[in-house]
Amino acid sequence: MLYREAGQFKTSYGSDQAIFPIRQDQIGIALLLLVAVLGVPALAGEYWLETIFVPFLVFSLAAIGLNLLTGYCGQLSLGTGGFMACGAFFAYKLTTAFPELHVLVVFLLAGVGSAAVGVFFGIPSLRIKGFYLAVATLAAQFFLVWMFNKFDWWTNYSPSGVISAPPREVLPGIFLTGTEATPITKYLFLLGLVAVLALVAKNLTRGAIGRSWMAIRDMDIAAEIIGIRPLWAKLSAFAISSFFIGIAGALWAFVYTGSVEALAFQIDRSFQVLFMVIIGGLGSILGSFLGAAFIVLLPILLNNVPAAIGLQMSVEMVSHLEFMIFGALIIFFLIVEPHGLARLWQIGKEKLRLWPFPY
Amino acid sequence: MEPAMEPATAALEAESQETPAPKRLGETLLSVDDISLSFGGVNALSNISFEIREHEILAIIGPNGAGKSSMLNVINGFYQPQKGRVSFKGTTFRRMRPHVAAKMGIARTFQNIALFKGMSTLDNLMTGRLLKMKRNFLWQALYYGPAQKEEVAHREAVERIIDFLEIQAIRKTPVGRLPYGLQKRVELGRALAMEPDLLLLDEPMAGMNVEEKEDMCRFILDVNDEFGTTIALIEHDMGVVMDISDRVVVLDYGRKLADGSPDEVRGNPDVIDAYLGVSH
């Protein structure tokens, strides 16, 4: 009843192809952005911004990147951590070599560098599919982390092997990285960047290139008959996916943690992002955000529940329970809705069209 | 079998009957020359030659395993024949490639439906127009200006096909949820969206009931008539084949048995023996 598109007529194909064709959605997303820009910085404390919203946004971007590759183009990849490391270390080398370069440019260039690496490690996808490809991308994961760990050049010969983001301004006088950066700056910068990149991802997926990816995913033989070249479709998916993931890695190192070592991007990270994509919903940009929220928020929530309901438990007990409940919830969600949270949201919206009336 | 006409198209038909336009049979559009294809020891095709002329409907018939689908696969480059050549629009190919075939204007449908199941009908048809979309991915990322104009222009072309095939109601339904007959129709639509010069249909009416077959026949004849598209189709329903095709090529065990008008083929003793059975 509340969510009905009755009476909203589309008079042009352009308006029918809009991202949010229904007015309720337009209002909803406007409100959401308003809350995100004004409400969250005003209400959330520094702790919340730093430990919840910043990692949520960084992970959302990584999940979008992987979703383009796995969800839209159907190429299973376990190299996410490696590509994130690429972004982080490329950005570090760039910004230490050219300190005058604006930090945004550094992030974008790091993304472009990761895209090139992604294309290289995507070449096996031309011959192998599915789980076999996943194993091949593992090579990227292990090789890249090993390389960044092994060669001191990447860390500018830091003895600990850790890179620390040097202080950089996003606007004159406003630091994004380094010790002077405030959580609000970080949050707003991330919000803007992730929102723009999410829009870019959405546009790509609803345009010609996205359709060629989905065609390869759904039926590669028929895609070839239509004139799609699997080479270009798959490698462009690897490139653009790695671009997003690389930027996410750079943001992780520079904005979220501030200092990072190559071992932070090990296989666990790849799985973490893959779970976000699977739980959020393969082939959905919204799902990437939902999945990132689920994986980032749930452990924090589970951690705080025992204290909140007054249960006295040891710290180890809490952390073990957290793992168990977390795993059980993942299985539960996958059984209830294999297409992820995004599909649940879709079903919810369908129900809302009639609610509270039976029909 | 006369395809059932709905009022609107019946009127069209009446109009075209007033001026019985001569069938615009033109030059040779595609010729296959001495094609041999074998898988290991199995000879799927041996020394097959025939040609397809512009604007005609050519039926390829033959018992199961005769090599009909292999022939189509050779034409659009899925299989590489060991011997022989394919010429299309005056260009001769030793090795045809699927994307080259698509670019030159060969579209096809499959015996087992090969749609993009996760995508809507609209997206499936839009995918058919990918080769005609020129904007690069940076424009697409912006989805603004030329890129959006291009999307809308192609959407209009796709909507004309949707109207033509009468699938307006399922425009936004994911094709995986559609019934079989409609999926076949969407697949035809995707091939039409490519605006092909040569349309290869692999058993477009398999598994359909009479009404669906009649609809499909009507669409095939209309495509041929209105757009002048040349059509090569594989079909088992003899009634359909004899009714709609201009010429028939008969294959059996990878060899060509006969090639000619439906009446000639029907009278050919070899065909009667091999295909329809030696019962008289």
Image (tube, grey):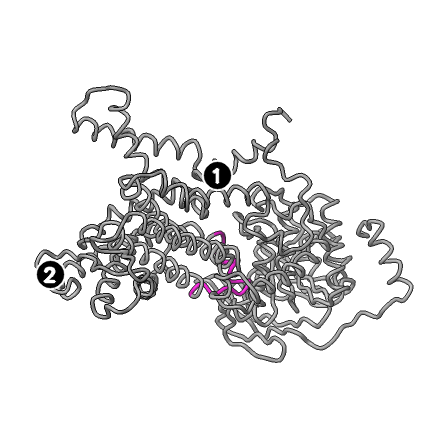
Q: Position of residue A103 (x, y in %)?
A: 30, 62
Dividing the picture into quadrants, the one containing residue A147 is bottom left
Q: Are marks 1 and 2 on the same chain?
A: yes
Q: Callout 1: residue from which chain?
A: A
List the residue tagged with mark 2: A158
Rendered view: B91 above or below B134: below
- Measuring 20% from the left and 20% from the top, which residue is drawn there? A312
Q: Mark 1 Cα within 10 Å, few/some/many (few <14, many 20+)?
A: some
Residue A136 visible within the image = no
Q: Secondary structure at mark 1?
A: helix
Q: Quadrant of the N terminus of chain A?
A: top right
The numbered mark, 1 or 2, whose residue comes first in the sequence reads 2
Closer to the camera in the image, A278 or A42: A42
Q: Is residue B68 magenta?
A: no
Q: Secondary structure at mark 2?
A: loop
List the residue tagged with mark 1: A343
Q: Callout 2: residue from which chain?
A: A
Closer to the camera in the image, A34 or B135: A34
Rendered view: B253 above or below B32: above
Residue A59 visible within the image = yes
Q: Amino acid at mark 1?
A: Arg
Q: Position of residue A45 (x, y in %)?
A: 30, 39
Dividing the picture into quadrants, the one containing residue A119 is bottom left
Magenta-tinted stretch: A218-231
Q: Is residue B94 left or right of residue B219?
A: left
Q: Main secondary structure of the magenta part?
A: helix
Q: Amino acid at mark 2?
A: Ser
